[in-house]
């Protein structure tokens, strides 16, 4: 056993050393090959789960269910275990599914989404969905993203649109809220999240909504308090001393906050005469195109809207100016990559 561990550590060390010698294209192919193997392995794992389920092997092993067995004895997280159970049971009825998993045209998450929608639809309509109907449904989900699959499933089964707001107070006094946003409202929220990505990297939707509410409250209370006393000088002082607003002036991603500042503040916080004009930055931010970094081999454009920054196509040190045709949006990762890679 100790020998196995030693050899495993050596193999890992050898692999790390070998990987560092690979060219970029070889490294990419290597990962692609491993991911293909991973999908084949996933198919095999699902076949094993089906066999274990049929034998109810988990019962003599002191697990009350297949789910409990996969979590406690095999070590999957509850969500991973449920996705594999959903996929395994679907594969029993639709054997073709295994091939689609191996090809990568259907992901575990989509299969799990389909199983959940089928359960809801069967309960709602009090009918059973046949294996051939399930197969047709899965064909429609092939090569679709998670949100696209969700939409197809909701429309296919005419699942009810939940609009009622649900709130539940939890034992630590936090409140769990279930909300429904329209398509347009969700797009606006997603945009707000992108614009806040400098200040709130990787924020959840909850954090974005909480942050927007906090900013609104600060903005309103900063205006209202001195107005009551008719003290305009204190109003100016209050807005200057709001750390949340002052702290984000170096950001190129927050035009709405910049526009709320006085011109003297803008000047003092952005004194360089060579800085990209705010009108151009705003144009980049309001554009829906996102990061314009292009992979020269594939033509793929990054398109990320997170941490978007104004970048000089012809760098300033190489004589590039601030004219709009020389400015483009790059995400911070590609902005940094461009200069470290010298491209
Ligand atoms: Zn990018």
Image (spheres, helix red, strand yellow):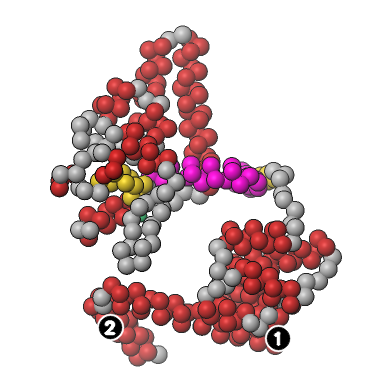
Q: Residue sitting at 51 percent across and 29 percent down?
A: 217
Would residue 275 be found to the left or right of residue 206 on screen? left
Query: How far across and how far down the image is residue 131, in percent?
Result: 74, 77
* Residue 96 occupies quadrant: bottom right
Give whichever of discs 1 and 2 has the lower sequence position: 2
Q: Residue sitting at 31 percent across and 63 percent down?
A: 296
Q: Residue sitting at 40 percent across and 76 percent down?
A: 32
- Residue wearing tag 1: 54
Q: Does the magenta stretch include residue 63?
A: no
| Magenta extent | 170-198
Say whether mark 1 is within 8 Å of ligand 1.
no
Query: How far across and how far down the image is residue 185, in percent?
Result: 59, 42
- Residue wearing tag 2: 14
Residue located farthest toward the right when viewing the structure as drawn: 126
Residue located farthest toward the left when viewing the structure as drawn: 318
Would residue 216 be found to the left or right of residue 113 on screen? left
Give the SS element for disc 2. Answer: helix
Label 1 – label 2 distance at C-alpha? 41 Å
Is the residue marked by circle 2 packed among few (<14), some (14-19), or many (20+) residues within 10 Å? Answer: few
Q: Is residue 187 magenta?
A: yes
Q: Does residue 45 appear in this view?
A: no
Is the residue marked by circle 1 packed among few (<14), some (14-19), or many (20+) residues within 10 Å? Answer: few
Query: How far across and how far down the image is residue 265, in percent?
Result: 30, 25
- Total labels: the figure holds 2
Pick the residue in front: 122 or 153. 153
* Location of ligand 1 given as a quarter of the image: bottom left
């Amino acid at each position: 056993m100790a020998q196995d561990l030693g050899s495993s550590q050596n193999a890992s060390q050898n692999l790390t050393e070998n990987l560092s010698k690979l060219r970029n294209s070889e490294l990419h192919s290597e990962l692609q090959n491993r991911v293909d193997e991973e999908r084949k392995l996933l198919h095999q794992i699902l076949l094993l789960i089906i066999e274990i389920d049929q034998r109810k092997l988990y019962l003599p092993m002191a697990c009350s269910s297949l789910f409990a067995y996969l979590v406690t004895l095999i070590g999957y997280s509850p969500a991973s275990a449920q996705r594999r159970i959903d996929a395994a049971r679907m594969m029993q009825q639709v054997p073709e599914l295994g091939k689609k998993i191996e090809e990568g045209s259907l992901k575990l998450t989509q299969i799990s989404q389909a199983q959940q929608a089928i359960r809801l639809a069967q309960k709602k309509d009090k009918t059973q969905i046949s294996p051939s109907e399930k197969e047709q449904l899965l064909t429609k989900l092939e090569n679709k993203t998670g949100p696209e699959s969700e939409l197809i499933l909701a429309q296919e089964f005419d699942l009810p649109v939940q609009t009622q707001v649900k709130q539940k107070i939890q034992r630590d006094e936090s409140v769990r809220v279930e909300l429904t946003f329209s398509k347009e409202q969700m797009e606006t929220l997603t945009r707000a999240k992108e614009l806040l990505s400098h200040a709130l990297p990787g924020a959840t939707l909850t954090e974005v909504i909480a942050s927007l509410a906090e900013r609104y409250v600060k903005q309103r209370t900063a205006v209202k308090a001195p107005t009551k006393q008719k003290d305009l000088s204190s109003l100016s002082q209050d807005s200057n001393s709001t750390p949340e607003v002052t702290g984000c002036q170096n950001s190129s991603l927050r035009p709405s906050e910049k526009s709320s500042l006085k011109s003297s503040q803008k000047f003092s916080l952005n004194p360089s005469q060579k800085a990209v004009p705010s009108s151009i930055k705003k144009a980049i931010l309001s554009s829906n195109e996102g990061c314009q970094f292009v992979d020269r081999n594939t033509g793929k454009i990054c398109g990320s809207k997170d941490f978007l920054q104004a970048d000089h196509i012809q760098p300033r040190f190489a004589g590039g100016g601030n004219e709009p045709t020389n400015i483009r949006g790059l995400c911070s990762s590609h902005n940094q990559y461009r200069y470290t890679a010298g491209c």
